[in-house]
Image: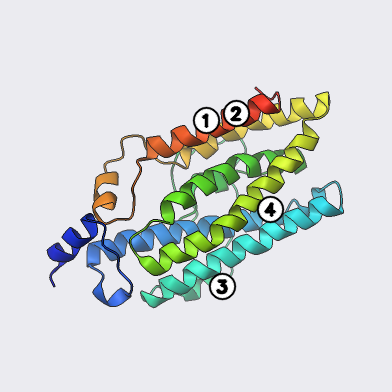
Amino acid sequence: MNDMSIEDYLAHGGKLTSPGNVPARYRGELMRLMASFVDSELAASAGFAEVINDAPGIKSRIAAARIVLEKADHAERVLTIMAEFGADTARYEGVHPWAARAQREADIGTSRRGGDMRLSVFHYPLEGWVDAVVMNVLQGAAAVIQLGELGKVSYQPLAEVFRAVTPREARHAELGREGLGKIAATQEGRAAASRSVAYWRPRVAAGFGTVGSARFERLKRFGLRHQPNEALLADWNAQIDALMADLTLN
């Protein structure tokens, strides 16, 4: 079967199950997708590791530590699939500055930096516990929406991994919302949280990618995307608007 017939098969909802029958262009896009997820999870894990000691109590510390552990585990699961495609996974065994961050007021848009493929939001630093909770809430909601999309990718083994990690990522977001609810219970907490929301919301939004992306149609033909960036972003904005109203953080 030639590449075009496989691409036609994918365009009509077909699934692939092993590296051996994957077209070169499809492989390139799949590897990019996986690398972005792995690098983002590792960068997120490293970032939250640095705020564990800022947590106000034992339960909060446990929640932060769980996020650090499980995000690293999610990265490892996808990295295992990358290895099946011949990816150089040895670079992940060495020391990489996953905790490195840009200046707080930098505006890097959607650009990738530092020699890895993390989403741009993971290049920004956390400033204390309230800031970390807000970021976790906003990015956690985005992650669940994005994983809903990724759980339908046409490479079946990867789709199964994404579906398996989604409940844990959803729990991370839930832990964040619980923490934010406690913070927003005081006037001082609401003020601090509102400042962090104003900072993080546009940076998390950038992680959904460009509206009207030219790459979307190609990814859709490969069965690697189904809903455009703007649809996912609109879903996220609606969820965050509702949450901000509930917590009077508008």
- Residue type, mark 1 in image: Ala
Q: Name the residue under label 4.
A: 48
- Residue type, mark 3 in image: Gly
Q: Where is residue 5 in the image (x, y as percent from the top left)?
A: 13, 64
Per the model, the C-alpha gap separating discs 4 and 3 is 20 Å
Mark 1 touching mark 2, by CB under 8 A?
yes
Q: Quadrant of the N terminus?
A: bottom left
Q: Work out whether 50 lies above or below 74.
A: above
Q: Which mark is residue 238?
A: 1
- Residue type, mark 2 in image: Ala
Is label 1 or label 3 in front? 1
Secondary structure beneath dot 1 equals helix
Mark 1 touching mark 3, by CB under 8 A?
no
Q: Name the residue under label 3.
A: 94
Identify the residue at image location x=80%, y=50%.
60
Per the model, the C-alpha gap separating discs 1 and 2 is 6 Å
Per the model, the C-alpha gap separating discs 2 and 3 is 42 Å
- Residue type, mark 4 in image: Phe
Identify the residue at image location x=24%, y=74%.
21
Q: Mark 2 points at which residue?
A: 242
Residue 238 appears in view = yes
Quarter location, residue 32: bottom left
Left or right of residue 209, residue 4 in this image:
left
Q: Where is residue 169 in the image (x, y as percent from the top left)?
A: 59, 54
Q: Which of 112 and 34 is in front in this view?
A: 34
Is label 4 or label 3 in front? 4
Residue 127 appears in view = no
